[in-house]
Amino acid sequence: MKILYLAHRVPYPPNKGDKIRALWEIKSLSSQHEIDLFCFYDHEEDRNSIDALRQYCNDCYVERLSWVGSRLRALKAVATKKPFSLAYFCSATMARKIKEAIAARGYDLVIVFSSAMAPYVEQESIPCLLDMVDVDSAKWTEYATTAPALLRWLWRQEGDLLAAYENHLAKTFAQTLLCTDAETAMLQKSVPDARIDVLRHMVDTEYFNPEKVEVPAEIAALQPYVVFAGSMDYAPNVEASIWFYRNALPALQKRIPQLKFVIVGRNPAKAVIELGKDPAVHVTGTVPDVRPYFRGAAATVAPMQLARGVQNKILESMAMGVPAASSSKAAVAFPPEVARLILVEDDPQLLAEKLTDVIESQPQPPRMEIRQALESVFGDSSLKARLEAFVSKAVKHAGTNQLKQKTNKSPESAARVEVSAGLTTR
């Protein structure tokens, strides 16, 4: 099968949740299908990484996302009451390149990774599978509950506008995928007749294997420590790390005075860097391999105050045999057989007490029970078969879902959908 894969970011290096998922999908599908990848980049690191993807792709088109242009488009979208998170990724050049490729290559399927790329193909008569990953509109709505007054209306408007567009996509695309049962139920409630299914994140238990990882001296010198790992320019990660530092770490250090808090991840925000001024906090920035930091940790913490989808840091920590502590908002993304193995606590004092018990008990490397639970739910082989089944189903059912609705759609309604997405390329 010839597949056009559209992603809002270069899915390499796999140092963020969305990149990990997109890269796994491309690698998995490339063994049986011919993949063309079209995507954006905004960091030279990502631009220089495109060559690593050529081993899986027949062709790769990557376009720089203008720092100024993307923000101006987003501001214009706000003023005209359109979703700014879609307008941000709008490009006439990308639209033209995609149309040319569709005309020349005769694709059997388009896989759209995130709703931001959907406007480029929603008017095309090709079966389309949308990996929405998370219900992003719910994220913006949740932002509005805690945002400053000046931003509250903006986040609420974005949530409402994006929710309407997500519902439209779920109705018209041949298949929509989300990463958790909770996200799937949320969207299914709004669009009960749509084809919506769960495709969980994959965790590589062979790669994240403590027996294959050594703890170098410079990391061992930080022990004992708890670790928070993630992209540290992502607002929910910044918020969670600051929350832990302010609310849980003081109580934890009363019980274990020598304990440190290690924050691992690329592009730390200024507020995170400020935490590093405390001798008890170590901020790494970008690291070549996160596994040694997991391996040397007494525990991983993920006290997410805003959480959408599965936290890879929890999966990877568990695979490395390190206890993982999570907020209830993050834990809800995990199925029961895995969630019961996570320390879930929202109260900072109780969290400190439970972490103390875990750390002082000096837990051993992963029990077979943990690895079996992870492999059964998040393992590569079972998820690969599931992805292939969704691809086949999308192509099979496109005629009765997506193409039928597009045939019945009036030119006026089609134009309204395109404008609402912020894609004004004609």
Image (cartoon, rainbow, N blue to C red):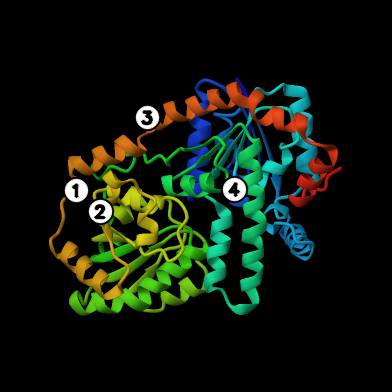
- Residue type (three-letter) at the residue carrying disc 1: Pro
Badges 1 and 3: C-beta atoms under 8 Å apart? no
Q: Amino acid at mark 3?
A: Ser
Q: Position of residue 417 (x, y in %)?
A: 76, 45
Which residue is nearer to you in this view: 326 or 358?
A: 326
Q: Which amino acid type corresponds to the residue marked 4 in the rendered image? A: Asp
Residue at 65% over, 61% down: 158
* Quarter-of-image position of residue 123: top right
Q: For the C terminus, give its image quadrant.
A: top right
Q: Which mark is residue 37?
A: none
Spatial CA distance of label 2 from label 4 is 30 Å
Residue 15 spot, x, y in % from top left: 47, 49
Give x and y (percent) for residue 402: 67, 31
Q: For mark 1, what is the residue?
A: 365
Q: Looking at the image, is mark 2 or mark 3 earlier in the sequence? A: 2
Q: Label 3: which residue?
A: 382
Residue occupied by mark 2: 322
Q: Are marks 4 and 1 in contact (CB under 8 Å)?
A: no
Looking at the rendered structure, the number of numbered marks drawn on it comes to 4
Q: CA distance from mark 4 to mark 1?
A: 34 Å
Within-10-Å neighbours for mark 3: few <14, some 14–19, many 20+: few
